[in-house]
Amino acid sequence: MLSKVNYKGFIVPLIVGIALWLLTPFKPATITVAGWHMFALFLATIIACITKPLPIAGVAIIACITKPLPIAGVAIIAYVIMVGTQIVPMGSVMNGNTIVKKGALSAFADSTPWTIAMAYMIARGFVKTGLGRRIALLFVRAFGKKTLGLGYSMTFIDLIISPATPSNTARSGGVVYPIIESLAHTFGSDPKDGTERKIGSYLVYNEFQANTITSSLFMTASAPNVAAVGLAAANGVHISWFGWLAAAIVPGLIALLVVPFIIYKMYPPEIKETPNARDWAQGQLDEMGKMKNSEKVMMGIFILALVLWMLSSFIPAINATWVAFLATALLLVTGILSTKDILNENGAWNVVVWFSILIFMASQLSAAGGVIPWLQGAIKSSIGGMSPMLVMAILVLVYFYSHYFFASGTAHVVAMYAPLLLIAKSAGVPVMFAAIMLGMTGAIFQSTTHYSCGPATALFGTGYVKQSDWWKMNFVLGLFYLVLYGLVGGLWMKVIGL
């Protein structure tokens, strides 16, 4: 049986790619033919990632293996051509021991996608050992006397496991939501019989916002974050793991402390007291028994990874990607994960395929013929005289609210992050400030719609929160995040020298 393909999704990327390719004779004089062709291929591919004729990895694979064709042949497959054309050779071109031109296969040598892939493995260890569930139950037992306390419990659960869970969908849907669902049913709250507002609606919506906040806190807490870091690096801006955390910690912690209470007042649950929650959590813990050796080992590896990730920001000899590989190797050596577990982690290998190729293409936009320098010059002349901070504020607003047109945080970051960073740099905004501010915006803009990201789709799909309520509250909290991260976060970044 053939897999379903969204052929309509091919139309717009194809038109854009062909149009730009055919406009080669009219390109700016400072851009080479190869550079212009790379620009056409890159833009068409980004649009294909948004229209999704295939999953992103599928688009990337097809584009990677496409052979060089004359311009006439581009009319059929231009939108899927990435690096397999005459612009970039398959293998690197060498002059003795020196690389003259990087080849297409070198795309998979970039460390960023491999870091996120190995972090996926750590997340799998949390689920497989049951450590994530145990941590969740311990928080419910400690803070579960009131519904508000349960809300904070879910928030802190998400916070604790987020540094090593780049799939925020797995974090919310695989670890936190099953606890929420069990609690909701314990208190007779189910959308099937119209009792969702008893407690379930509050807990589900609170988890979505908690997931949004924790995604902004750590570089490794969300795939769009890692995409932003990779694109920043492709443009010469290197964000460390601790550097991201240092910038995000003040607005992030404020949000974690304030947002559950805001939601509690704005969207109050009918049940305010939950004395049975502690007993329920204790019963679940009793069923799990004492902490298994596998959980203890998983905890040790997790703590080791966090410590080394922090140290990697200060000690050049410790590489963040090496830390992720070390943690995965330890999971294998200790038997926490099997080779089969590694091979079956589809999300990790999906990231390696598509993101490696897109980062390579982004880096080639400059190396292949001056596209980036030309854009810098054009932008700088158009915003001359405008305050750098005003430019930055406009960029953040555009970036945030344009997410209403996207159903994937990663696709949005890939499409807009690098151009907006380029504009900020040309306007005189301190480049590290711009890179991290846009990176954090790429996390909080998931607080827009019920289709904004994986967690939104998964949690909204449970039926606990009506769409109208979801959009209304998201609009209010979106304004809160913009003020908190833009003003408070901006001032904090100024204090720490960014």
Image (spheres, rainbow, N blue to C red):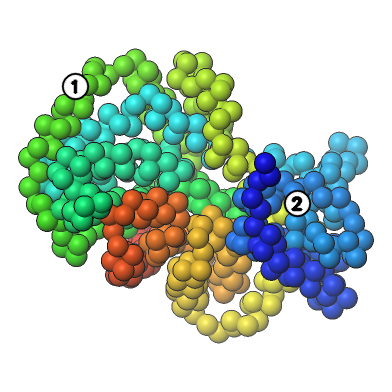
Q: In this rendered view, identify the residue nearer to me: 12 or 172.
A: 12
Mark 2 = which residue?
63
Furthest residue in direction front, as rendered? 1
Horizontal arrangement in the rendering, residue 110 relative to residue 314 (left or right): right
Q: Report the amino acid beneath label 2.
A: Ala
Q: Quadrant of residue 342?
A: top right
Q: In this rendered view, identify the residue nearer to me: 394 or 277.
A: 277
Mark 1 = which residue?
286
Q: Quadrant of residue 157?
A: top left
Horizontal arrangement in the rendering, residue 461 relative to residue 28 (left or right): left
Among numbered discs 1 and 2, the one appearing first in the sequence: 2
Q: Position of residue 58 (x, y in %)?
A: 67, 47
Q: CA distance from mark 1 to mark 2?
A: 52 Å
Residue at 65% in and 46% down: 3
Q: In this rendered view, identify the residue nearer to me: 173 or 3.
A: 3
Q: Position of residue 45 (x, y in %)?
A: 69, 59
Quadrant the N terminus occupies:
top right
**Disc 2 element:** helix
Q: Is residue 448 above or below residue 230?
A: below
Residue at 44% in and 34% down: 123
Q: In this rendered view, identify the residue nearer to me: 410 or 99.
A: 410
